[in-house]
Image: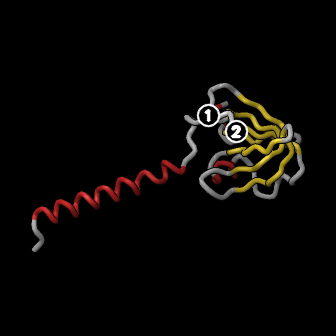
Amino acid sequence: MPHASQTRRAISFAAAIALIAGSLPVLAHHGWEGYRTEDFEITGTVETAVSLSGPHASLKIKADGQVWNVVLAPPPRTARAGLKEGMIPVGATVTAYGHRHKDPKTLEVKTERLRWNDKLFNVYPERS
């Protein structure tokens, strides 16, 4: 039979593992707190097509000679907005509307809406 101190250590260890494991999805999720509150708009050409993998859909665009990461909504929500992988070709011009990253060295925009030609993909309609 295990000694009482061994049992307490085992319970403490299990609790620590559960706490760490439970916080991993939160750490991987892109919340809004890392982005500025002011509206931001950027137009550029698609460098890397829309990807629906990962915690958020994304694409890369080139604007003013710099490549920007355009972070969209989680993949199911992005797809519900009508935006699918392969839909917007590399080289197409798009405009992202959202919020720029707080770190000026990070070329990233958390996007609420993406315009391509006459289509507007509203991936966060409640934020409009």
| Residue at 73% over, 30% down | 40
| Residue at 81% over, 39% down | 115
| Residue at 81% over, 42% down | 66
Camera-side residue: 43 or 85?
43
Under mark 2, the amino acid is: Val
Camera-side residue: 99 or 125?
99
User: In the rendered image of this protein, does residue 56 appear above or below residue 66?
Assistant: below
| Disc number for residue 109 | 2
Quadrant in which the N terminus is drawn: bottom left
- Where is residue 92 shown, x and y percent of the image? 89, 48
The reply to whether residue 119 is in sight is no
Left/right placement of residue 8 relative to residue 20 reads left
| Disc number for residue 35 | 1
Mark 2, Cα crowd under 10 Å, few <14 / some 14-19 / many 20+, is: many
Asked if labels 2 and 1 touch by Cβ distance under 8 angstroms, the answer is yes
- Where is residue 109 shown, x and y percent of the image? 70, 38
Left/right placement of residue 127 relative to residue 95 reads left
Left/right placement of residue 92 relative to residue 103 reads right
Under mark 1, the amino acid is: Tyr
Cα separation between marks 1 and 2:
8 Å
The reply to whether residue 8 is in sight is yes
| Residue at 83% over, 37% down | 43
User: In the rendered image of this protein, does residue 19 appear above or below residue 125?
Assistant: below
Quadrant in which the C terminus is drawn: top right
For label 2, the SS is strand
For label 1, the SS is loop
